[in-house]
Image: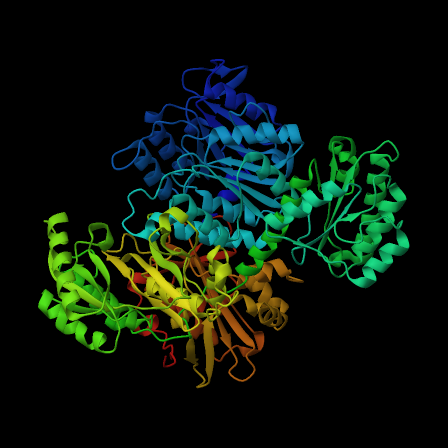
Amino acid sequence: MSTFRLEQVFRPRSVALVGGSPRPHSLGAAVLRNLQAAGFSGEIAVVNPRHAAIDGKKTYPSLAALPFTPDLIVITAPAETIPGIIREAGARGVAGAVIISSGLGHGEGSHAEAVLRDAHAAKMRIVGPNCLGVMFPALGLNASFAARSPAAGSLALISQSGAIAAAMVDWGAEKSIGFSGIVSIGDQLDVDVADLLDYFALDEKTRAIVLYVEGVKDARKFMSAARAAARLKPVVVVKSGRMAQGAKAAATHTGALAGSDAVYDAAFRRAGLLRVMDLRELFDCAALLGRSRAPQGARLAILTNGGGLGILAIDRLAELGGTAAVLAKDIAARLDAALSPTWSKANPVDIGGDADAGRYGAALDVLLADPGSDAVLVMNVETAVASAPEIARAVAARVGEDRAQRRDSAKPVLAAWVGNDQLVAPIFDKATIPHFPTEDDAVRAFMHLVKHREAIEALMAVPPGVSSLFTPDVESARKLIANARKEGRAWLDPIEIAALFAAYDIAIVPTIAAASPDEAAAKAAPFLGQGQSVAVKILSRDITHKSDIGGVILGLATGEEVRNAATRVLERARRARPDARIEGVMIQPMITRPAARELILGIADDPTFGPVMVFGRGGTAVEVVKDKALALPPLDMNLARDLVGRTAIARLLPAYRDVPAVPPDAVPLTLVKLSQMAADLPEIRGLDINPLIADESGVLALDARVAIGPPARLFAGQTRLAIRPYPAQWEGELKLRDGSTVAVRPVRPEDEPAIARLLDRVSPEDLRLRFFHAVKAFSHQFISRLTQLDYARAMAFVALDQASGEVLGVVRLHSDSRYENAEYAILLRSDLKGRGLGWSLMRLLIDYAGSEGLKTLTGEVLRENMTMLAMCRELGFKTASDVHDAGIVEVSLDLATVPDHIRHAGLIRPNR
């Protein structure tokens, strides 16, 4: 697992500093000072062969000379000595090292390569190099050279920048914000962002995770860890480099529209991370999400004593996509009864500049009980006739009463005491009511809550697999691309594009090739004979942007016009691009749809995240208008609708004035088809349809470009997608030893209730054998972790009763961070022993692990669990005693040596 040994690294019982120094301003001196001052209760040793003692503390010449084996070593020694230090630490059984030193280099032959190789061999974890260090305040561990020691709290900070981490420590001190842990990861030689997301997601002391990102190395691993963490607790991210010009060299319009930061934004959205733009917003948002209940919707009721302030809040709410709650007649009547006649009669509920604590309390009672709103924002501007602290105390009391009465159904309440936030802060902090200095901050915070809820709901969905809405001809598409690649081409020609689109049921304007002007006139005749004008376009595999060289002439009504146009187009192309291979011209009928909207759809190729879906306003000015939205595939209809809805052009797709509506799902379905194409054909390196015209009759591609090439990188499963599609190919049936059959498939989030029922039907003794201790109850969080997988680093199969659909058993694996080795676990209903279900599920898991290219499958079994050990031996697992616990047997299967009769599980797949 990616958290392997991190518990020992971040919760060490002992620490050794290698490179401690007496020089006042050295890294070694700063780290030693912090280690000693933070209050760490375990042993601390200093290794330095040049000094007998530093600041009165005895030193040791080497790790081998230490009287104990430290769990963690912190290294500030020179770079050239570090490989030797790691080898020595590995020999002693050290769990991990934080390398603060820089200068280890990169790539083959570097110190970094030697460190990583020797650390892996010794099963050590490495944080860094070139980092600030790590801090775990509740443990009294400050293994860093930060200027301040952070307070203990519930925020975890993961930072790719040491300077940003140090700044956040200072900021946290000023804002009285504490941390459960702070890790500066530096060059991420081993432990990376994804590993730390996994760790803090399961850390009970962490309520929210704060993430500073400069870039991602392994997109599949990052997305898997981020999605898993965001399902369990809020993850807030700020990323630098937003203004990077990542699209300058893009070959397609969609590539130019995507841009590096826009792709990261799409990735964060899909992962359920909440992105903010600066450090202040980062802290505010993380603190808010870590202690506030998410609203059920985006309807906000606003209570204020200042009408102008309320209107500003409503304006900001609308700009950010929220909704001003509408006061129903019965709610307005209740407010009439509780307030003076001068109140505003609408939302925002302005109760007058002279409103006192009593009036605030009466109005708040009504708004808290109103089913027409999802949250309440209470605002106040202090006047000479009413005390701001007194009103704050009244609000806090009413909110406390409401929470006690409604419990989990109580609405979130936010406060903004403009000009007096610091004065009332202790009152609201004690009542755990989020408070803000301005109405803008408060509304923005409310929308963070809304977006977080929406993100979590989206994460509960299964990553889409093969769409059931259409059946692509994948084999024909693959052959077409393979033929083009054999010829060494980087682009499909328009005739091939038409065939590719036909394979995926994407309508495109008919395209006919002609080698000469005379042939062009002849082939245009059928269209002209029906009174339809045509367009002539240059046909060249080397010219992708035809209009740029005058290679397009439109509106041709006669054969002579076609002949002349073809002649001119060919001359222009040869003059503008003498190097280009010109096959002739294309004839296309002119499409006249006066009410059509011009759109652009496509697949951009990102070097980190792979294929990215792009949608927006199309036409020749597409890169000027820049009305676009991005999403990571795979897409289903809901995700595609969301992608379309995030653009301005989406507002023109429904009917308006005398313009009929575009069929609601015509555009989203086309995006789903392109998404499937991206999943099926990793050789596609870029694609755009510009324009795709859409009107009441549907959609039609008028022009398209498709770039091809060898896949830059394939993740497990032979796909370039950073988010793994639902593996529907692993659905089927298994025939058991007793002759019966069970349905099997990958686990889904909706299986949580059935898994809970399964656990209820496992005996206490079987639970003890599975979990190594007595288990009385399982939490929702525990069961949700079993079912909410994204199939990238973990897989679980459920066996289902064919008649009832009840879960009979579950088997799962979780890979390490390098996707080489995986640990398995299995659990069956206790009344099903002896039928061969466990045997069949284990063979299925072995089959899956081998198909993924994993090398080893491992597990831990209680020595007394003779049934499980016997099955493991029969399956070919090797057994060995756990060196730390004689009661546990470690089992390991080399997947390369599994015989066919074991590997092939006999999964009966349905015809598709």
Seen from the viewer's position, the closer of residues 781 and 736 is 781
451 on left or right of 602: right
Seen from the viewer's position, the closer of residues 644 and 154 is 644
Q: Where is residue 702 in the image (x, y as percent from the top left)?
A: 30, 64
Residue at figure coordinates x 78%, y 59% from the top left: 370
Seen from the viewer's position, the closer of residues 871 and 191 is 191
Residue at figure coordinates x 48%, y 51% from the top left: 225
Residue 600 in which image quadrant: bottom left
Q: Is residue 608 visible?
A: no
Q: Where is residue 815 in the image (x, y as percent from the top left)?
A: 42, 55
Q: Position of residue 553 (x, y in %)?
A: 22, 59
Q: Is 322 placed above or below 852 here? A: above
**Where, quadrant-wise, is the C terminus in this rendering?**
bottom left
Q: Is residue 576 visible?
A: yes
Seen from the viewer's position, the closer of residues 185 and 211 is 211
Residue 406 in which image quadrant: bottom right
User: How many badges with numbers are in the image?
Assistant: 0
Q: Where is residue 645 in the image (x, y as percent from the top left)?
A: 50, 59
Residue at figure coordinates x 87%, y 35% from the top left: 386
517 on left or right of 381: left
> What colour scheme was applied to this rendering of the protein?
rainbow
365 on left or right of 226: right
